[in-house]
Amino acid sequence: MNFVCPDCGESYLGNDDRGLPEPRRFDCVSCGRLLAAACMPVRPIRDGVRGVPLRIGTPWEHRRHVGFIRGFVDGVSRLAIQPGEYFRQSQSGCRSGAAAFSVICAYGATVLLLLLLVLMGGLGPAGLLSSASWRVELLLFLFILVPVGQLMWNYCYGLLIQMVLFCLGRRGSETERSVHAVAYGSAVLPAMVLMPPLGLLWYVSVVASGVENLHGTSRGQALLATLIPFLVAANVLLAAYFTLA
């Protein structure tokens, strides 16, 4: 594969045993831009040749080498802004750390929600924290319900996405890839706390990008797979509301 400078179009041939340019970071010989192999667009050496994404891993997946905080901040920022690029590099699998990443993001969203409640007086001296029983229940919520609930959501939503993909004809896709996409979509959970409607659309967009890139589906199929479970859930809730009312 030829790795291409996004500014001037100068191409570089992958020359190591993994087909990547060596060194990984270098200045373009034509325009002088600092290039990183992980972020360069690629094109086949011969026209008409098709390939699969070379998933070299993200900084979060290599956090033992690049640092935990650096890997996490990189993941949150890039998933929020450039999810497609992030998922193209990501390695879907049980050791990728996607579950841990989602739990940390869930804690961040929970802390943000609690801060908003404090500012509105819901957890102040006259609020819920004035009761000892509420303080105990809040601790149980933070240390048990948040991580367990997030992991359950990852797998439940991932399975629903997988069912839709199956109905759309994607019968060879792996469930773990859908769960992986949902877990990394947690990067924008704080946005759902601050601005729920926009945050929800943002969340669906990130998850859809993960489904598209990890499964190799079309953008339309990925959006259907991520939206249909929400639409079904909304219809069930509406039906239950009108039945009880």
Image: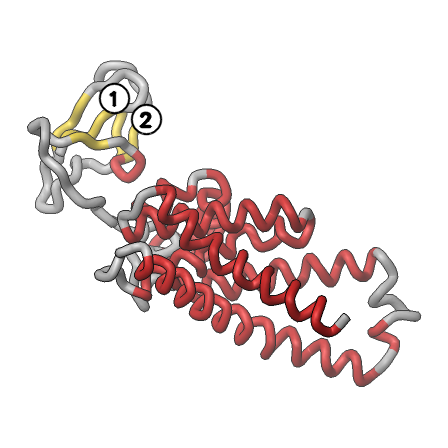
Q: Which mark is residue 114?
A: none
Position in image of residue 28 (x %, y %): 25, 21
Q: Is residue 69 visible?
A: no
Residue at the location (34% across, 47% down)?
A: 212
Q: Which mark is residue 34?
A: 2
Outermost front residue: 243
Q: Which element type, helix, strand or loop, lies under badge 1?
A: loop
Of 196 and 42, nearer the camera is 196
Position in image of residue 242 (x %, y %): 71, 67
Residue at the location (55% across, 73% down)?
A: 149
Of 204 and 4, nearer the camera is 204
Q: Is residue 50 above or below residue 129?
A: above
Residue at the location (73% across, 74% down)?
A: 244
Report the number of discs.
2
Q: Is residue 207 above or below residue 27?
A: below
Residue at the location (40% across, 56% down)?
A: 181
Look at mark 1 in the image and give the residue it sits on.
28
**Local crowd size for mark 1, using a 10 Å CA cut-off: few (<14), some (14–19), many (≥20):** some
User: Colour mode?
Assistant: secondary structure
Q: Are marks 2 and 1 in contact (CB under 8 Å)?
A: yes
Position in image of residue 65 (x %, y %): 33, 55
Of 231 and 195, nearer the camera is 231
Q: Is residue 143 visible?
A: yes
Answer with left or right where residue 186 lies relative to residue 98: right
Residue 110, located in which quarter of the rendered image? bottom right
Position in image of residue 2 (x %, y %): 15, 30
Q: Which element type, helix, strand or loop, lies under badge 2?
A: strand
